[in-house]
Image (cartoon, rainbow, N blue to C red):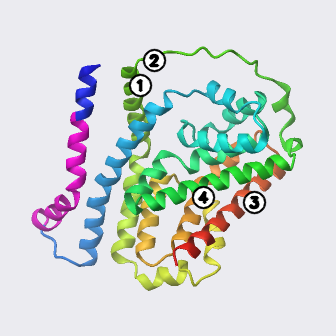
Amino acid sequence: MKNKILLLSSFLIVWILLYLNLNTITDFIVYSIIGLEKNTHLTNAIWFFIFEVPKVLMLLILVVFGVGIIRSYFSPERTRKMLGGKSLFTGNVLASSLGIVTPFCSCSAIPLFLGFVQSGVPLGVTFSFLIAAPMINEVALVLLFGLFGWQTALLYAATGLFIAISAGYVIGRLNLERFVEGWVYETKIKQIEIVEEKIPFSERIESGITAVKEIVAKVWIYIIIGIAVGAGIHGYVPENFMASLMGKSAWWSVPLSVLIGIPMYSNAAGIIPIVQALLEKGASLGTVLAFMMSVIGLSLPETIILKKVLKIQLIGIFIGVVGVGIIIVGYLFNFIFT
């Protein structure tokens, strides 16, 4: 236990020193080692790439490790028990909050949906969880914090929670259980007593390390591709072009960005570096965040997967309610950041 804490402390010291000196290290690599001329399109693109890749990966490793420890206190069974029997609004708030810290993604949509609904968790509460889990995960928050600062990350988390809570509440109030495939309700999961396990903190540290290995292994390639695309936009796309297409003056840019984003698929790791580059070229914050939310919050694979347990009417209502919420948030961000 003492050895693990010592190693963890050493890692944090090295992490802080590297992170605080990334700018200087990048300047040395780009201008001294590679020998590029300052303020050219190519130099700007390469500097952006070399600086952002380690910065984002370092932030990701640190926060995923911390969230991995938090996640060790949760399990699907415990989550279902916490959400079961809650009133609609209270359940929506709790489910959306749990969605941020629990280890589920869009690929888990069907088993999660079945487990929750068959355990007696209300339909609207289940949807709040399914919306929040992919949209407001630790990868998205880490990248937003690293690229835009804590204010933007906090606002994104707050508005994402608003969408998850309100969309789940609306779906719950509409009593749409008739649009769930009939076989879903034929099997009820037996309520089992959850035995409280006393796990040593050293094992929870192992959970954090495992989370880093699993999550970073899955998303690192998306981060590099996303930053590479962002670097190209940063270095070569004219500012006036993006301002005219996705700027505040284009009132139609928010709903259009949502319509474009819904059929696309990417995760936060791939889309956020592109969002940063678009912002630097004159796109408005509300428009690009609405685009990002629609891509990762209404992912096409999740929608296709849910078709196995939901009728098309409910999927349409789900997309419509969440889409309207995202559009409202996009306009709100554009209004606040004028």
Toward which corner of the image does residue 252 lie, by quadrant? bottom right
- Distance Cα–Cα, label 3 vs label 1: 40 Å
State which mark lies toward you, 2 or 3.
2
Type of amino acid under label 1 = Arg
**Considering only order in the chain, which callout, 1 or 2, is on the residue closer to the N terminus?**
2
Residue pointed to by mark 2? 199
Q: Measuring 65% from the left and 62% from the top, which residue is drawn there?
A: 326
Type of amino acid under label 3 = Gly
Crowding at dot 1, Cα within 10 Å, few <14 / some 14-19 / many 20+, comes out as: some
Q: Measuring 44% from the left and 41% from the top, which residue is drawn there?
A: 218
Residue pointed to by mark 3? 320
Do callouts 4 and 2 mark residues in contact (Cβ within 8 Å)? no
Residue pointed to by mark 1? 204
**Considering only order in the chain, which callout, 3 or 2, is on the residue closer to the N terminus?**
2
Residue pointed to by mark 4? 159
Do callouts 2 and 1 mark residues in contact (Cβ within 8 Å)? yes
- Distance Cα–Cα, label 2 vs label 3: 43 Å
- Distance Cα–Cα, label 4 vs label 2: 35 Å
Q: Measuring 24% from the left and 37% from the top, which residue is drawn there?
A: 11
Q: Measuring 67% from the left and 44% from the top, which residue is drawn there?
A: 93
Q: Residue 81 at x, y = what percent?
A: 68, 26
Q: Is residue 37 on the magenta stretch?
A: no
**For numbered disc 3, what is the local secondary structure?**
helix
Do callouts 4 and 3 mark residues in contact (Cβ within 8 Å)? no
**Considering only order in the chain, which callout, 1 or 4, is on the residue closer to the N terminus?**
4
**Residue 264 appears anywhere in the view:** no
**Residue 156 appears anywhere in the view:** yes
